[in-house]
Image (tube, helix red, strand yellow):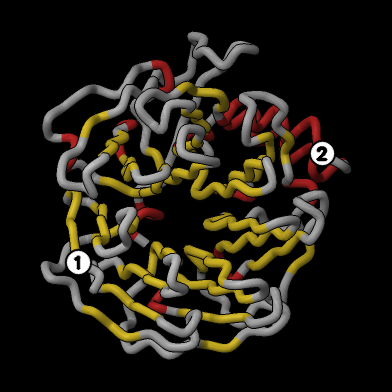
């Protein structure tokens, strides 16, 4: 919920090699590098990931931080933009991606120490126009081109050599996880005529799941070549997805709603949650445990693949947005509007 309130955006053009070009009439936020500051660990941090043993957090004004000592000390990365970053993901210990406002996608090949801008919202709108399958989709694409690069990405997923990124007003792109070009717009493949916001995407093998506002749930079984709507058990917004085991899907979001499907999203059961606070982030640990993060900093922990959760109140309540487990999974690092908090898991 906290992350959603901060997600607005702009954009600039790109050269064929991914470097930023000055574009008259467009804000320059995508062309200015993030300012280095000793106060960066106290900034609003919206997303987190792990690359091998390295922990990474990112958020407002292009701030990316990395730590190699379980989150005790943090170093600020070199980032070519000053916009809010909303999602991080890694292919391996070195190669990763970030998504953010203004349709920005950034790539790193050195475990997050330096980043390159490879996509912006203006170019994404052009891709949407190229992929339009009928007059209605072409008109929609033209509106986005005229509105400019103002659509933020909210989430990304990496699987089977593919990168998928989703965002506001049905914005969705797919590309190669090992390349900075070759992106395709997915909007024409999604059953989303009202252009609902897409808040979460997760992928495993050839299966791709997307969740969004007003209970929107979509699934692909062919690696994103086509999508089908799933029966939705809830008409509020889903802010996150987790894929557990071979067939279990967990969807969570507004007002503490948690829904679980044991059969790839065909049927859903609500999971009891005594905490009526929106859930904005979640992780699955190597032992099968699931941890969900509420916007007040409380944790919900499941030891049975999301069938039930126990509440662990925050040691110090704070407006939380993201979490990541340290490499030994004994510590959690939480990020939010007041920087970084560390918390023991056991």
Tell me which residue sits at (58%, 32%) in the image. Answer: 147
- Residue 344 image label: 1
* Left or right of residue 52: residue 337: left
- Residue 132 image label: 2
Seen from the viewer's position, the closer of residues 166 and 148 is 166
Q: Secondary structure at mark 1?
A: strand
Measuring from the top left, give residue 251's x and y in whole percent: 53, 72
Residue 322 appears in the picture as rendered: no
Q: Quadrant of residue 82?
A: top left
Measuring from the top left, give residue 204's x and y in whole percent: 65, 58
Tell me which residue sits at (87%, 42%) in the image. Answer: 133
Instruction: Check the image and report above or below for 15 versus 297.
Output: above
Residue 257 appears in the picture as rendered: yes
Seen from the viewer's position, the closer of residues 241 and 289 is 289
Rounded to the nearest whole Å, what is the CA distance between mark 2 and mark 1? 49 Å
Q: Earlier in the sequence, mark 2 or mark 1?
A: 2
Q: Nearer the viewer, mark 2 or mark 1?
A: 1
Instruction: Check the image and report above or below for 311 versus 282.
Output: below
Tell me which residue sits at (63%, 84%) in the image. Answer: 268
Measuring from the top left, give residue 47's x and y in whole percent: 37, 49
């Amino acid at each position: 919920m906290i992350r959603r309130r901060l997600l607005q955006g702009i954009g600039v053009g790109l050269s064929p090699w991914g470097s930023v070009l000055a574009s008259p009439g467009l804000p320059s936020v995508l062309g200015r590098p993030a300012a280095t500051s000793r106060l960066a660990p106290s900034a609003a941090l919206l997303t987190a990931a792990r690359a091998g043993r390295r922990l990474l957090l990112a958020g407002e004004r292009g701030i990316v931080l990395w730590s190699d000592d379980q989150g005790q000390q943090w170093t600020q990365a070199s980032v070519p933009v000053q916009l809010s970053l909303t999602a991080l993901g890694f292919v391996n210990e070195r190669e990763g991606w970030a998504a953010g406002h203004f349709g920005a996608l950034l790539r790193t090949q050195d475990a997050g120490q330096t980043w390159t801008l490879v996509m912006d919202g203006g170019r994404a709108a052009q891709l949407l126009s190229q992929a339009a399958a009928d007059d209605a989709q072409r008109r929609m694409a033209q509106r986005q081109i005229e509105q400019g690069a103002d659509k933020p990405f909210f989430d990304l997923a990496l699987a089977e050599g593919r990168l998928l990124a989703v965002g506001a007003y049905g914005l969705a792109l797919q590309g190669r996880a090992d390349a900075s070009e070759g992106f395709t717009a997915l909007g024409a493949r999604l059953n989303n005529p009202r252009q609902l916001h897409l808040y979460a995407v997760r992928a495993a093998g050839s299966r791709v799941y997307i969740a969004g506002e007003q209970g929107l749930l979509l699934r692909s079984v062919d690696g994103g070549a086509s999508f089908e709507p799933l029966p939705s058990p809830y008409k509020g917004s889903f802010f996150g997805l987790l894929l557990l085991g071979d067939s279990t899907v967990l969807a969570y979001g507004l007002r503490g709603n948690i829904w679980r499907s044991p059969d790839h999203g065909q049927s859903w059961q609500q999971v009891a949650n005594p905490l009526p606070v929106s859930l904005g982030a979640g992780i699955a640990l190597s032992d099968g445990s699931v941890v969900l993060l509420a916007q007040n900093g409380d944790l919900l922990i499941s030891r049975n693949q999301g069938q039930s959760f126990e509440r662990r109140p925050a040691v110090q309540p704070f407006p939380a947005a993201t979490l990541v487990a340290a490499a030994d999974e004994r510590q959690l690092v939480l990020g939010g509007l007041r920087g970084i908090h560390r918390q023991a898991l056991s």
